[in-house]
Amino acid sequence: MLEFKNVSYKVVDEKTGKERYILKNLNINFPENKVTVITGHNGSGKSTMIKLIMGILLPTEGEILLDGQALNSLSISERANLGISIALQQPVRFKGLTVRDLLNLASKSHNKIPDACEFLAKVGLCAKDYMDRELDDSLSGGELKRIELAISLAKSGKVMLFDEPEAGIDLWSFDSLVDVFDNLKNKTVVIVSHQRKVLESADFVLLLNGANDVKLGKKKEILPLLEKPSCRKLGGLVNG
Amino acid sequence: MDKLDKELLSQIADFHTIPQGSFNIRKNGESLDRKSTKDIEIISKKDKSGIDIIVKEGVKNKSVHIPVIITVGNLNDLVYNDFYIGKDAEVLIVAGCGIHNPSNQKSQHDGIHSFHLAENSKVKYIEKHLGIGTGSGEKILNPTTVVEMKKGSQFEMETIQLGGVSKSNRKTDAVLEDDAKLVIKEKILTTDKQIAKTVFNVVLKGKNSSVEVISRSVAKGKSKQQFISNIKGQNECFGHVECDGILMDKAVIESTPKIVAKDLNATLVHEAAIGKIAGDQMIKLQTLGLSEEEAQNEIIKGFLR
Ligand SMILES: Nc1ncnc2c1ncn2[C@@H]1O[C@H](COP(=O)(O)OP(=O)(O)OP(=O)(O)O)[C@@H](O)[C@H]1O
Ligand SMILES: [Mg+2]
């Protein structure tokens, strides 16, 4: 199980020198082997939350645990090898490395035969056209985002994190994208999203409404809260 | 040919067996083996050290390999090779030099290669440079490439130096006539206290002539690299220079772009970026389970591929 124990993340404002809590004293148990969608307004700390899980950021206070093991002292690669994977909100571009290289690196880490074509097909890309493309500026934003997803599917793991996977993906491909998440069984899946369809496909929804204001519950319980006018500051829901 | 010769040849010229087509192998300043064919003739120069390589008009899909290997210290090898490429001919030329210096004295190879491309001829030229050997003797390589390009000719050059060369001074001069097209891809890796200097002088003389230079380099340790390019556009022409450098440890990279346009319709662009490996690239590969060192190696391997 993935848990947050009194987790805080604070930053120091460079200009004023004042401290600001992005996340404050959070206690969360992410439901095991279920899909949890994190939602909340821009800047509420959703990406921060999943970067903390991956180890890209470290909590300034508190501890994150996976199956009882404290993660704070583990590096990003150690966490990856424990079975945590991430698809970033802003995928990284590389000069010289190809889609094939990244898919191979991703699947080698657990010695699976890289069936790279399958991963590209899942995100709606034709392997033949993309396999040997460089991950550089020549890829469009949506293409890069899909490739990021394919890479994280290739990496896989017992905890899979996705940061706004639908961003930049065209409407036509939306349903098959939701299918991708539906098919991730027996994994703890955490998706950051603003999209109604993604939220509706969730088992649980985590609503981030302030540094120490977190509501986690079954989709049925949380979704109605999002419809209330008082929640408009959450940015409301996006249909798609 | 002994085991070391074969090892060097396979690394610099992908020489696993005796190649098809014409070839000349030079070892420690002397010709070791040679084959001329009716399409591509190789003749020793009479007045100085070196060879003339004559590619007949209209020859297609042929290749010539002219690797140089040095396996001793205290040698200063200067060689002049001239390539005459006939009209409409299309050839692959593989050159390169591998030095294995076991001694504590320096070994040096200066290869001056001049290419004379007739109208509409097409050349792909690959040149690899390598230094190995545990002795403290320096391994110095100074390749000079001169390219004269007649109307409609094309020259694509790949120049690769992946480690082990103590000092190199690489000069490339080209003059392009109408519709000529030059593409240069350079890849350089330096480590320790190595020094690598590259100078490109390209004159776009003819109408619709074009040059593209893509230089990618990685400097590690206390190595130093210098990149100088000077592109002159004297007609309606196109020039693009892209110089990307990854800097590590205490290395230094210096890039000096110069573009001179003398015609209103000349389009010349120079892009240069030098910096350490991007942090987000390191993080991405670490999230796939690679250690910091593995991530670094993969990024560099891809970058210099
Ligand atoms: N180093 C920092 N210094 C100051 N503020 C920071 C720093 N890093 C992040 N923040 C702030 O933390 C907040 C949370 O950022 P985060 O990226 O987690 O938001 P998010 O919920 O993912 O937003 P979005 O929906 O736009 O992706 C933002 O207000 C951001 O400006
Ligand atoms: Mg975000």
Image: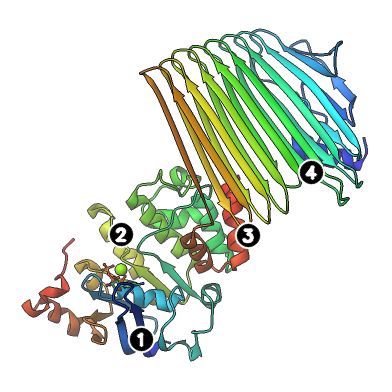
Reading the chain from its start, which is encountered first: label 4 or label 3?
A: 4
Looking at the image, do the residues carrying marks 4 and 3 touch, with CB atoms under 8 Å apart? Answer: no
Residue holding disc 4: B131
Is residue A187 visible in the rendered image? The answer is no
**Residue found 23% across the figure and 86% down from its top:** A213
Is residue B242 visible in the rendered image? The answer is yes
Callout 1, which amino acid? Ser
**Could you say whether the residue bearing mark 4 is in a helix, strand or loop?**
strand
Q: Distance between the residues labelled 2 and 3?
A: 46 Å
Reading the chain from its start, which is encountered first: label 2 or label 1?
A: 1
Residue holding disc 2: A176
Return the mark for residue B249. 3
Looking at the image, do the residues carrying marks 2 and 3 touch, with CB atoms under 8 Å apart? Answer: no
Q: Is residue A54 above or below residue A211?
A: above
Residue B186: image x %, image y %?
Answer: 61, 37
Q: Which residue lies furthest to the front in this view?
A: A16
Return the mark for residue A8. 1
